[in-house]
Amino acid sequence: MASLLWAWLLGLSLWGLWASRRPGRRFTEQRSQWLRDWGGWILASSVGSFAPALAPNAPSWLHLGLMLAASLLLLRLAHALDSRVVGYGVVGGLGLIALFLDSLSGSAWARDGAFGHGLPTQSIGDLYGALAILWGLIVCRAWLHIEGNPLGTAYLMSLSALWLSWKGQAPALGWGATVAALTLSLLVIRRELTERRRVRIAIQNQPVRTARVARGYDLALHGMVLLGLCAMAIGLSGAPAVQVRTLSPEEGWRLAIGIVCGTGIVWKRALRPLPPALQRAWLVGTLLTALLSVQPSGVVALGMVLYWGILGSHLQETPRPMSNLPIRTGGNE
């Protein structure tokens, strides 16, 4: 089943590379336009990969059908909301919540899912752990889009690092998630401090000062709490060990996905689908997890294909064309 899923993701990546070369035909009036959201299909398929765990002994064709059905429902849910960014965040959040609850109840989905490790252990494998980091960053993107408190994203990733350090099968997940959380936390706190200084200057330039702006003491407290959470995560993870890399039948699919998505990302490098802090956390978290993981090519391929899918939402969203309204000038009846 894993090979079929990698082949499916490769097909979606090629679809996105082909569709992004036709910028003039992205907008249509069809109600089924949501079915053409190849970026949404990529994210929905990553969460829908849990579906084969519902029937672990079923044949591969049934596993594929269950995954496609679940992905279709998740994609429709993402487009049922007003904003595609929020819709993607809801789908990523469902994947994160499902994996968290599964880790507390036997880890059947993390074991028998399409990206599962297949071992009789109650832990999260490298691939689903890497997906948890990426899903968390997608949720953070949606949180920032609705103008939520940026510190909430730092706490989410820090708690996710603590959880992956506890339930992760290897120290790679704890270390990768912790580095991503530290990167995001430092950048968020620095920006918050900069923005507050700007607000303070703006208020001081007004004739009447109506509010007192905090001097950053609370940010120092938040920073200490976040560092404490990350330190606990590192302690639970333990020392990273050099993992033995083994070649698997999916290596070819992963390499092809990396080439296709890398080509598309480099070609559209002027577009930034994530805020700078999330983008850096995405990069360092994926790379460190891959370096310490048993399946580095799989972690890198997942990071690239999900990033390519998020980039696809920017490539496909175009302003709705305005109707040609009659122009009235003075004196016309």
Image (tube, rainbow, N blue to C red):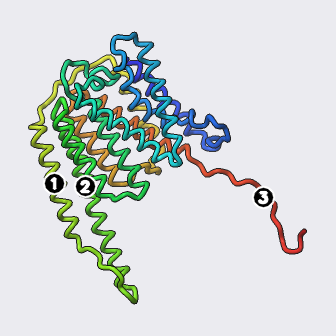
Image coordinates for residue 23, horizontal then vertical, percent? 60, 43
**SS for tag 3?**
loop
Is the residue marked by circle 2 packed among few (<14), some (14-19), or many (20+) residues within 10 Å?
many
**SS for tag 2?**
helix
Q: Place residue 151 in its image quadrant.
A: bottom left
Say above or below: 150 vs 299: below
Relative side of 320 to 200, left or right: right
Disc 1 designates what residue?
A: 227
Q: Place residue 309 in its image quadrant.
A: top left
Query: Tag count in the figure?
Result: 3
**Mark 1 residue type:** Leu
Disc 2 designates what residue?
A: 185
Disc ID at residue 205: none
Could you say which is closer to the camera, residue 101 or residue 255? 101
Q: Place residue 150 in its image quadrant.
A: bottom left
**Mark 3 residue type:** Leu
Mark 3 vs mark 1, CA separation in Å: 58 Å
Mark 2 vs mark 3, CA separation in Å: 49 Å
Image coordinates for residue 273, horizontal then vertical, percent? 44, 48
Is the residue marked by circle 1 packed among few (<14), some (14-19), or many (20+) residues within 10 Å?
some
Whether residues under marks 2 and 3 lie with C-beta atoms below 8 angstroms apart, the answer is: no
Say above or below: 108 vs 153: above
Q: Earlier in the sequence, mark 2 or mark 1?
A: 2
- Image quarter in which the N terminus is found: top left
Residue drawn at x 30%, y 33% as measured from the top left: 99
Residue drawn at x 22%, y 46% as measured from the top left: 159
Q: Earlier in the sequence, mark 2 or mark 3?
A: 2
Mark 2 vs mark 1, CA separation in Å: 9 Å
Disc 3 designates what residue?
A: 325
Whether residues under marks 2 and 1 lie with C-beta atoms below 8 angstroms apart, the answer is: yes
Image coordinates for residue 257, horizontal then vertical, percent? 40, 29
Q: Earlier in the sequence, mark 3 or mark 1?
A: 1
